[in-house]
Amino acid sequence: MSAHTDKLSERLFQLLSHSNFLAMKGLANEVPIFIQTYDPAHEDAIRRMVDSLAVRLRNGGITLKTLDLFSLVLEELEEQHVLGDLIEGEKDFARAEVLETLQNYSDPKTHLIPRLIHTIGDGGTQLTLITGSGRIYPFLRTHTILESLQPALLRHPVVIFFPGEYAQDPNGGSHLRLFGSIPSPRINNAYYRATNLDYYRL
């Protein structure tokens, strides 16, 4: 890993392993969803960092889950017996048809979030790390996941690694900018806001 990802890994380890963070102290009424942004150019290094960070946290006695959003979508397609058809007919399907199918089977409210919550489970998980935000574009956007996660009543912190920028407005709205250039619609409901780990302090 580079010096930058080494530094980020150490900071995240100290933060995510802290008892106050795991107990979600100081969040008031906000949901325990956190976003860790990173430079899209560091995608491979960040994936390796998340893997090693997860091992280190588990070795420290923390029960956690690591999930990749793209892998969850593939699991849904396979379970619905759609993945094989998509692969076999890739050359014949129009791009719009493939995109529509992916959007239908990755819909957060009806497919992805129920699968995500089921995968996380309620068996003593203390922390969940989520990657793959860039891999699910353009058929799924991170802001729709944030809006759908809130009603799930999460009982532990969830950290989403996001290749881009995340900004919060003083009036409560927030913006995600995938890859630093593709903006999402403004998230106006403050109840859906995730906490930016770049500026989070215990």
Image (tube, rainbow, N blue to C red):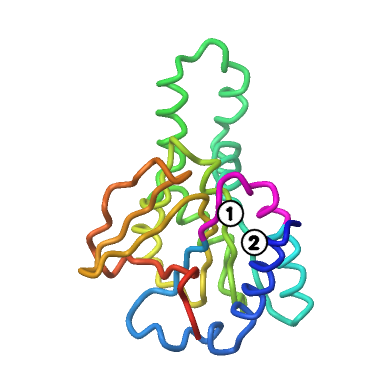
Residue type pointed to by label 1 = Thr
* Image quadrant in which you'd find residue 113: bottom left
Q: Quadrant location of the N terminus?
A: bottom right
Q: Please, what secondary structure does the residue beneath circle 2 have?
A: strand
Residue visible at 54% across and 89% down? 20
Query: Which residue lies at the image location 39% right of the left edge and 83% below the top edge?
Result: 27
Residue 13: give x, y in percent of width and height: 67, 75
In reply to whether residue 145 is colored magenta, the answer given is no
- Secondary element type, mark 1: strand
Q: Nearer the viewer, residue 178 or 31?
A: 178
Looking at the image, do the residues carrying marks 2 and 1 touch, with CB atoms under 8 Å apart? yes
Q: Which residues are magenta?
A: 37-48
Viewer-side label of 2, 1: 1
Name above or below for residue 93 compared with residue 24.
above
Residue 131: numbered disc = 1
Circle 1 packing at 10 Å, graded few (<14), some (14-19), many (20+), is many
Does 139 sit left or right of 59 as displayed?
A: left
| Residue positioned most to the top | 92
Asked whether, in this view, residue 20 is left or right of residue 101, the answer is right
- Furthest residue to the front? 3
Which quadrant of the view contains residue 31?
A: bottom left
Q: Nearer the viewer, residue 6 or 71?
A: 6
* Residue 152 horizontal/vertical position (percent): 40, 66
Crowding at mark 2 (Cα within 10 Å: few <14, some 14-19, many 20+): some
At a point 49% along the width and 68% down the height, the residue shown is 198
Q: In the drawing, what numbered circle is on residue 66?
A: 2
Query: Residue sitting at 51 percent across and 58 percent down?
Result: 37
Q: CA distance from mark 2 to mark 1?
A: 8 Å
Residue 59 screen position, x and y as percent: 79, 77
